[in-house]
Image (cartoon, rainbow, N blue to C red):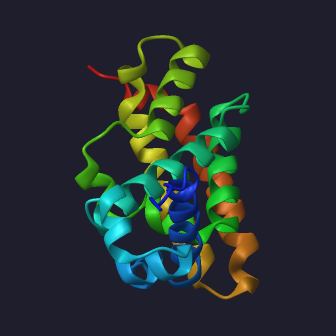
């Protein structure tokens, strides 16, 4: 009797890989572990995904999409930054994926960056690329704030959060300093 392909297998593999990554980070994501946890075989997994990097690529894309969905309702650049901060602190493994060198290796547009650029052009005028230096400055600030909030004692969180909010406000107020010349 011929075997029937499982139309839900790919989704199950990706959900399993996401869960494994969220539990143990990139080291926990081996092809064998994903296959076993997804209830399939390693050869079957390789029929659907060339390698571990391909699975990680899809996980990055899923994380990016979740962050875009979280930030899309923002009504200001300050709110967008706060939403990114809140999301990344609540989803540290997504932050790990989104800030990993894998994102740079993908060599694809970053949806959250694109959203921030488009919204900046909508809110402040000009073209999206005109706001690139400002968005990179804000992204750098976000990266630093997230890492500090994850690694420093909780008693310092309010100071870091207040400093972050003030710095975002100042950068946005002084956005002309980032304008192309």
Most foreground residue, 21 or 165: 21
Residue with the most extreme bottom position: 153
Most foreground residue, 42 or 131: 42
From the top left corner, tell me how far across and down residue 105 is, in percent: 23, 54
Seen at 51% across and 39% down, the residue is 112
From the top left corner, tell me how far across and down residue 173 is, in percent: 58, 32
In which quadrant of the rendered image does the C terminus lie? top left
Residue 53 lies in what quarter of the image? Answer: bottom left
Most foreground residue, 178 or 2: 2
Looking at the image, residue 34 sits to the left or right of residue 169; the answer is left
Residue with the most extreme top position: 126
**With respect to residue 176, does 146 lie above or below?**
below
**With respect to residue 176, does 23 lie above or below?**
below
Looking at the image, residue 119 sits to the left or right of residue 26; the answer is right
Looking at the image, residue 109 sits to the left or right of residue 3; the answer is left
Looking at the image, residue 130 sits to the left or right of residue 164; the answer is left
From the top left corner, tell me how far across and down residue 22 is, in percent: 57, 75
Q: How many marks?
A: 0
Residue with the most extreme front position: 1
**With respect to residue 147, does 110 lie above or below?**
above
Seen at 73% across and 84% down, the residue is 154
From the top left corner, tell me how far across and down residue 106 is, in percent: 27, 49
Seen at 50% across and 69% down, the residue is 17
Seen at 27% across and 65% down, the residue is 51
């Amino acid at each position: 009797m011929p075997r029937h392909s499982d139309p839900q297998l790919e989704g199950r593999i990706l959900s399993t890989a996401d869960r494994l990554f969220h539990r143990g980070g990139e080291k926990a994501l081996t092809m064998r572990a994903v296959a076993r946890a997804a209830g399939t075989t390693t050869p079957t997994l390789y029929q659907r995904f060339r390698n571990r990097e391909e699975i990680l690529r899809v996980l990055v894309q899923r994380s990016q999409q979740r962050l875009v969905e979280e930030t899309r309702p923002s009504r200001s650049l300050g709110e967008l930054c706060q939403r990114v901060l809140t999301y990344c602190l609540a989803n540290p493994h997504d932050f790990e994926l989104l800030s990993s060198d894998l994102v740079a290796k993908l060599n694809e547009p970053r949806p959250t960056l694109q959203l921030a650029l488009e919204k900046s052009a909508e809110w402040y005028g000009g073209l999206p690329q005109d706001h690139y230096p400002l968005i990179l400055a804000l992204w750098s600030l976000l990266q630093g704030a997230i890492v500090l909030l994850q690694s420093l004692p909780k008693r310092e969180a309010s100071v870091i959060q207040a400093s972050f909010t003030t710095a975002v406000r100042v950068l946005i107020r002084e956005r002309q300093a980032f304008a192309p010349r």
